[in-house]
Image (spheres, rainbow, N blue to C red):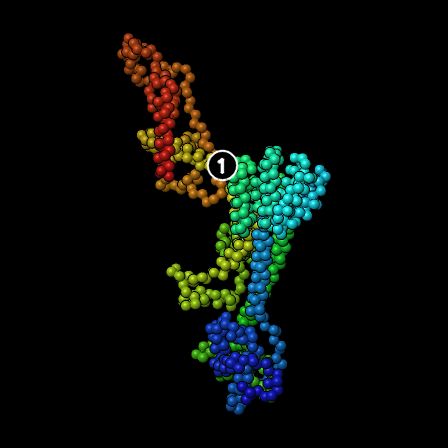
């Protein structure tokens, strides 16, 4: 490598890779490209696209060293040409290459931002899951403070000082002796001389058992105090005090047995109940309650919750407001992170577009110029090809790769690739209606975060600009049409297995974020759907379906009950002129709906509906029949039958010459509809319950039959 590059060139050369294997690979590829030509470099790029170890071929890491090594190889080859070869032009300083874009670092930053969004979502969900626990804890503290305040207010109202009793109760935490219990009982007898004072002191003891930081042994010892008090009242025949104790004993025992875990204390509690039952200190209702402490606890919680419902609501509202602040912070943070991700992705796409543009721009200049042999030592001044920058200053300037013919001698187009033209926004506006445009034009309005239906804004539809395909698109097309491999297997239909797994994973993550956000607000994913029919629309649809069903039944009944008349009507309609009135034409077309089923398109009622409301068709005009008024006119003299009968002596009334029978001709009866039109002239419409029943059941049968057909 250094045979044709002097010390000055080595000092100006880019720093080689630290890894000797990477350096050897770059030198080897540079030597191969210098010998084989630029088509070899292009082939290497296409074969190793997307591999990080070959990033120097497309301007990645160590691309400067690769270009320098390639130029030195070409210079060394040109030094061996025969005399008479044109010396190259004076070297030009190599322009500074802009720092290459680190795609790996950008992708790592995107992953880090997404992980931060996920962590924020996890923290938000943890706050939401902790709300019930926090509510229970704060509610218990608030209820305890309220109950203790109420008990203190009762004590202050009656002027009872319990400081002496508190000193004795503190001794029950460590041990319970007969002397302590006797002293407490004596204090109660001395200071609680009325039923009101006794009930207040029992309420105070219950508050100490429920809310104070009391141990299991303390609660048991309080029950021992109640036991001595009850025995004393039973011995002294004080039934009133026993009744007062009966109202508090079940609650004291229930709270003592509710959270007990020590088996020794459980045995002592059972023994205490057995002693009370044996001595019959209390009523049977008290013992029945003592055997079901869980019911007592549940009733207490229910009554307490009803009493302190306002406090519970305030606590819940405060916690929800706090969580709402956390949720708002999370949304702002997620939006900020999403904007950063979008900016980085846009930057990555822009860098890739720049690389593709530079690739297309520099490719023709590599093959420009004209020469007589394979390697030309005398290129035009300043022309070093698109992929090969000018070498550093040297005593003998190196030549560059420049050829006019490929290996097979086929001519190569020397025209340079034009720069992409500026896109005129107005030229992209479609002129055809939106329903005649390709379906792909709507992709610009469909975002990956869109999970529900959104109407396409026709005014924002744009046609794709006429630009050459990018390198990324070409690589994707090559991968699409490439045969299946072990890394890219195909399914039974020929599609790449898990080809869209990244897209669906991202889509599912966005859906989960949206569902979790709406779940916090008490909503579901279905609440986001806005294009659904309202209750009024559903009622209208139901009415239209029922009306259509009735019309089909009427058409079927009219067609099935008078087949001969319908055939006569069809034959007459063919022979008559088309000069009938519009009203007559409508009646004839509606009376035979099956006439056009084989040759005409279906009617709007029979056409399939593809969503949305169907416009209600106008009701046909009612059919009116003219009923003759008064008796019919007698036959005139122009009637041939009347003339023949007059010759036989008929005067125009009755039958025959004697004019017997009915004197006047039979008048036409009123026009009847449906089944009634086939009944005789003398039929009178009367209410017949059997006929009504037959009509009702017959219509239901026809309706069921039509439903099976449809």
Image x and y of residue 387, in percent: 55, 76
Q: Nearer the viewer, residue 563 or 145?
A: 145
Exactly how many numbered labels are in the figure?
Answer: 1
Residue found 42% across the figure and 42% down from its top: 607
Disc 1 secondary structure class:
helix
Query: Can residue 30 be spotted in the picture?
Result: no
Indicate the quadrant containing the C terminus: top left, top right, bottom left or bottom right.
top left
Residue found 63% across the figure and 40% down from its top: 202
Residue found 52% across the figure and 75% down from its top: 57
Image x and y of residue 311, in percent: 64, 43
Q: Nearer the viewer, residue 383 or 207?
A: 207
Residue found 63% across the figure and 45% down from its top: 181
Q: Nearer the viewer, residue 57 or 681?
A: 57
Q: Quadrant of residue 640?
A: top left
Image x and y of residue 145, in percent: 66, 45
Q: Residue furthest bottom?
A: 83
Q: Is residue 651 above or below residue 599?
A: above
Q: Quadrant of residue 68?
A: bottom right
Query: Can residue 17 be spotted in the picture?
Result: yes
Q: Residues within 10 Å of mark 1 (few under 14, many from 20)?
A: few
Q: Residue furthest left?
A: 648
Q: Is residue 622 left or right of residue 243?
A: left
Indicate the quadrant containing the N terminus: top left, top right, bottom left or bottom right.
bottom right
Q: Is residue 106 above or below residue 437?
A: below
Image x and y of residue 233, in percent: 61, 37
Q: Nearer the viewer, residue 228 or 71?
A: 228
Q: Name the residue carrying label 1.
A: 539
């Amino acid at each position: 490598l250094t045979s044709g590059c002097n010390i000055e060139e080595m000092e100006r050369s880019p720093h080689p890779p630290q890894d000797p294997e990477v350096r050897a690979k770059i030198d080897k590829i540079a030597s191969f490209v210098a010998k084989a030509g630029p088509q070899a470099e292009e082939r290497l790029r296409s074969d190793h696209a997307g591999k990080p170890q070959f990033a120097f071929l497309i301007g990645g890491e160590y691309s400067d060293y690769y270009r320098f090594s390639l130029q030195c190889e070409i210079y060394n080859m040109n030094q061996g040409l025969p005399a008479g070869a044109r010396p190259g032009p004076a070297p030009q300083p190599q322009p500074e290459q802009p720092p290459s874009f680190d795609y790996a670092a950008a992708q790592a930053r995107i992953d880090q931002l997404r992980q931060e969004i996920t962590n924020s979502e996890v923290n938000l969900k943890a706050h939401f899951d902790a709300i019930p626990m926090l509510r229970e804890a704060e509610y218990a503290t608030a209820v305890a403070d309220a109950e203790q305040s109420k008990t203190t207010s009762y004590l202050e109202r009656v002027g009872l000082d319990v400081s002496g009793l508190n000193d004795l109760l503190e001794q029950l935490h460590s041990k319970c002796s007969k002397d302590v219990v006797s002293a407490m009982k004596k204090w109660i007898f001395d200071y609680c001389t009325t039923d009101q004072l006794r009930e207040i002191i029992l309420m105070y003891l219950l508050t100490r058992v429920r809310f104070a930081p009391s141990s299991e042994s303390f609660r048991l010892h309080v029950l021992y105090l109640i036991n001595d008090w009850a025995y004393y009242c039973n011995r002294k025949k004080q039934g009133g005090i026993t009744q007062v104790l009966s109202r508090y004993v079940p609650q004291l025992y229930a709270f003592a047995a509710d959270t007990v875990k020590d088996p020794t204390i459980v045995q002592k509690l059972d023994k205490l109940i057995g002693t009370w039952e044996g001595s019959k200190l209390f009523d049977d209702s008290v013992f029945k309650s003592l055997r079901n402490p869980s019911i007592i606890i549940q009733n207490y919680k229910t009554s307490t919750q009803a009493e302190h419902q306002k406090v519970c609501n305030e606590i819940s509202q405060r916690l929800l407001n706090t969580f709402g602040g956390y949720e708002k912070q999370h949304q702002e943070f997620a939006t900020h992170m999403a904007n950063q991700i979008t900016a980085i992705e846009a930057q990555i796409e822009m860098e890739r577009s720049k690389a593709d543009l530079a690739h297309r721009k520099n490719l023709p200049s590599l093959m420009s110029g004209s020469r007589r042999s394979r390697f030309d030592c005398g290129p035009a001044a300043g022309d070093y090809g698109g992929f090969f920058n000018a070498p550093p200053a040297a005593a003998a300037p190196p030549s560059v790769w420049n050829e006019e013919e490929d290996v097979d001698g086929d001519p190569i187009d020397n025209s340079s690739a034009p720069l992409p033209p500026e896109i005129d926004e107005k030229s992209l506006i479609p002129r055809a209606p939106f329903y005649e445009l390709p379906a792909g034009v709507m992709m610009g309005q469909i975002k990956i975060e869109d999970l529900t239906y959104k109407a396409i804004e026709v005014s924002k539809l744009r046609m794709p600009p006429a630009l050459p395909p990018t390198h990324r698109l070409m690589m994707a097309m090559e991968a699409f049409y490439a045969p299946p491999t072990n890394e890219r297997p195909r399914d039974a239909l020929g599609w790449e297995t898990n080809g869209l797994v990244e897209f669906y994973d991202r889509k599912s993550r966005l859906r989960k974020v949206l569902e979790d956000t709406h779940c916090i607000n008490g909503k579901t994913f279905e609440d986001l759907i806005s294009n659904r029919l309202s209750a009024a629309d559903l009622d209208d649809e139901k009415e239209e379906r029922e009306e259509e069903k009735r019309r089909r039944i009427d058409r079927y009944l009219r067609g099935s009950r008078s087949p001969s008349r319908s055939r006569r009507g069809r034959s007459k309609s063919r022979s008559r002129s088309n000069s009938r009135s519009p009203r007559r034409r409508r009646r004839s077309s509606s009376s035979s709906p099956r006439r056009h089923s084989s040759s005409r398109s279906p009617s709007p009622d029979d056409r399939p509906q593809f969503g949305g409301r169907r416009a209600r068709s106008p009701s046909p005009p009612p059919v009116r029949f003219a009923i003759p008024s008064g008796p019919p006119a007698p036959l005139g003299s122009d009637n041939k039958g009347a003339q023949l009968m007059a010759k036989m002596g008929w005067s125009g009334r009755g039958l025959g010459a004697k004019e017997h029978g009915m004197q006047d001709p039979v008048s036409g009866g009123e026009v009847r509809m449906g089944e009634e039109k086939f009944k005789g002239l003398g039929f009178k419409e009367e209410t017949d319950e059997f006929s009504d029943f037959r009509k009702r059941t017959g219509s239901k049968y026809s309706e069921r039959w039509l439903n099976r057909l449809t």
